[in-house]
Image: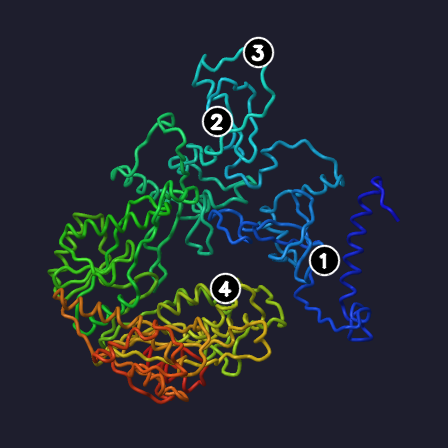
Amino acid sequence: MRRTTTEPLVLRSQCAFSKWYRREENKRPLNSKQVSPIELFSGSTVQPQLKHFHHFGCPVYVLDSALQAGKKIRKWSERARIGINLGSSPQHAKSVALVLSLSSGNVSPQFHCAFDDMFETTTGNQAKLIPKSRWQEKAHLRKTRELSTTQEDEGTSTLPPEAMAREVVQQPTQEAENPPNVEADGQDQVDLSQQQTEQGSEQQVDQNVRRSTRERRPPARMADYIPIDQVAFEAIAELSEPETEWEQANPLLAYKATSDPDTMYLWQAMKEPDANKFREAMQVEIDDHMKGGHWQVVLRSSVPKGSAILPAVWQMKRKRRISTREVYKWKARINIDGSKQIYGVHYDETYAPVVTWATVRYFLIQALIKGWYTKQLVQLIKNLYGQKQAGRVWNQHLVRNLTKLGFTQSSVDECVFYFKKSIFLVYTDDTILLGPDQKELDQIYKMLQMAFNIQDEGNLCDYLGIHITRCEDGTMQLTQPHLIDSILADLGLDKQGATGRVTPALTSRILHHDIDGEPFDERFHYRSIIGKLNFLEKSTRPEIAYAVHQCARFCSNPKQSHAEAVKRIGRYLLETRDKGLILHPNETTFECWVDASHAGEWNRENAIDDPSTAKSRMGFVLMFAGCPLIWSSKLQTEIALSSTEAEYISLSAAMREVLPLLSLMKEARNYGVPVEIGKVDIHCKIFEDNSGALELAKVPKMRPRTKHLNIKYHHFRQHVQSGLLSLHAVTTEQQIADIFTKPLSDLLFQRHRRAICGW
């Protein structure tokens, strides 16, 4: 039957659903027979995959067309647009979906999609980010309304409505009309009344002269203008809770969202019992900036035309003692909204170095061995934060002034500075000063006090979220109990009756993608937990490195099996909450333990969908004086064809960490710092033909099975031949790096943990 143009469009939408339903039903197996109608009709076997079935009408997010083409877009631009799922395309592969555009009403086949089958993005705060649907009007299912351009673009505007009414961005022209507002496509509304008042009689226009009816639009270069009313000092007076829909849906301009209860919005801080403390901190912040001359107040009329005015953002923070959780400082920091900056216009380079944890641990171990004094300094930076280049600007300022004071910057680690026999370590504004002479440290502190606004925190205690305890027996303990408590609370394991575990991973199961597994029930924020576990593992808990890395691989699509593995790590942390890393130096030896598990995660069932199961896992730990400096557990980036190749790749990766640390040790001694340097021993486990890896590292002979190895894996041979590095074979039971490559039994895990962590 031919469809006429007068056919009700509601019936057409019903027909679309009917077609989708019949098309999907033909692919599903019948109850009586384990074959689908399409298989019976075609006489061939068709294996439908459930991952290609999605709810009709569910939200679907389509990747931006520029990203699909391999191009780059601006950092804060939307990566995807939302549409409505109309089922799979009958003219393409099963993985191609038909998507209805909310704005244009067009239907197009799309491959790069993410489906919200549970309609989770249609409720809560996420629903406010969904643009208004216009396809019903385009399809004449709903009466077309006269909407202003500003209302149409309300979801994408970067300014609140009340701010847009105040903003003046259009340049005066001789053809300017005199209505209260001029609408702009995709830009802010322009209020000309204020502009006319400033210009006086020059802006008066004869109303009888015929004018063009063409819509006036501000130039695109004015899109970066932000009203001066929203910067700096108005942010001090804006203490109320955001009430408008725009403020709730666009928190990035004026607030910083976080799960930390001690990091708050401005309006939240004003509702707290200690609001007066934050007000005092805000006043101190403003006064310090004014005294330091970090800004100056200028008239808006003096701002050069075309220059962007960036808004200000307040960040409120309580700082607590790590051990007691006692609040000892209230911080209020005013920041620049760096999201409005343009690359190449406002900034170029943004990289700012920080001291590595391997360097910090090395000098802490030296302090224990030599009985050095330590002092923690906090530099009260009054650089304007928030700019993309703020960290780099501060680092350059710091290096320049330290050099003038007589410090020598390390050529190995940019954040290590030498002054006579003392060491100065810099991590942005948190620094450590240590050395054998207390008088020399006091002299350095006075020099820094004159050059910088610094605060003496006393002996090293809390550094970068880690509680450092110097014990009477000559050991040093690094712990993060507050972070573990946060992880347990997120997992729901902080309640009474929660049970612990003695190992972080099951020995009977290797995690895979689990494509057909039970979906994750979303009882906790998977990515957030993994982020906290990563920081914990890299800081003070090396024994959970393998388990954490296994779970981190599946952040994009976690299953219930992966969530159970994360909870297993949480139960292990519950059992060992007060534990951490114990530095107990003995002999001044420098050892590196390397291990690899050749294709140890291979899974025949998932190999087709997940080729990474063929990759080998490598792990290593660098030990100085019996204390760990740096460790790693990761999959190799390429598939090794033999266990010899897997072990040799691991050996090469470990050497990239060993050689810079050796250079740092020698450099410190050359500058007169009394440090101990031990001989380097590289221990590599014998596994099958692993003796070939040892032989390959010693003798540069081209072999048929190893000639394909890239030259990048041979970079340390010259150091072996010169005697700087020596290689030794160890048994499986003695290989402590085994803890980074596979789940171990309780007894073996505890033995290796004691060798690395000291408990």
Amino acid carrying label 2: it is: Gln
Q: Are marks 2 and 4 in contact (CB under 8 Å)?
A: no
Q: Which residue is mark 3?
A: 209
SS at mark 1 in the image: loop
Dot 2 or dot 4, earlier in sequence: 2
Residue 170 - label: 2
C-alpha span from label 2 to label 4: 49 Å
Q: Nearer the viewer, mark 2 or mark 4?
A: 2
C-alpha span from label 3 to label 4: 69 Å
Dot 3 or dot 4, earlier in sequence: 3
Q: Residue 40 versus residue 630: which sits nearer the camera?
A: 40
C-alpha span from label 4 to label 1: 46 Å
Q: Residues within 10 Å of mark 1 (few under 14, many from 20)?
A: few
C-alpha span from label 1 to label 2: 49 Å
- The quarter of the picture where the C terminus appears is bottom left
Q: Nearer the viewer, mark 1 or mark 3?
A: 1
Dot 1 or dot 2, earlier in sequence: 1
SS at mark 4 in the image: helix
Q: Residue at x 35, y 62 (%)?
A: 465
Dot 2 or dot 3, earlier in sequence: 2
Q: Nearer the viewer, mark 4 or mark 1?
A: 1
Instruction: Using the image, determine if residue 513 lies above or below residue 597.
Output: above
Describe residue 543's horizontal placement relative to residue 615 as left or right.
Answer: left
SS at mark 2 in the image: loop
Q: Which residue is mark 4?
A: 490
Amino acid carrying label 3: it is: Val
Q: Which residue is mark 1?
A: 91
Amino acid carrying label 4: it is: Asp
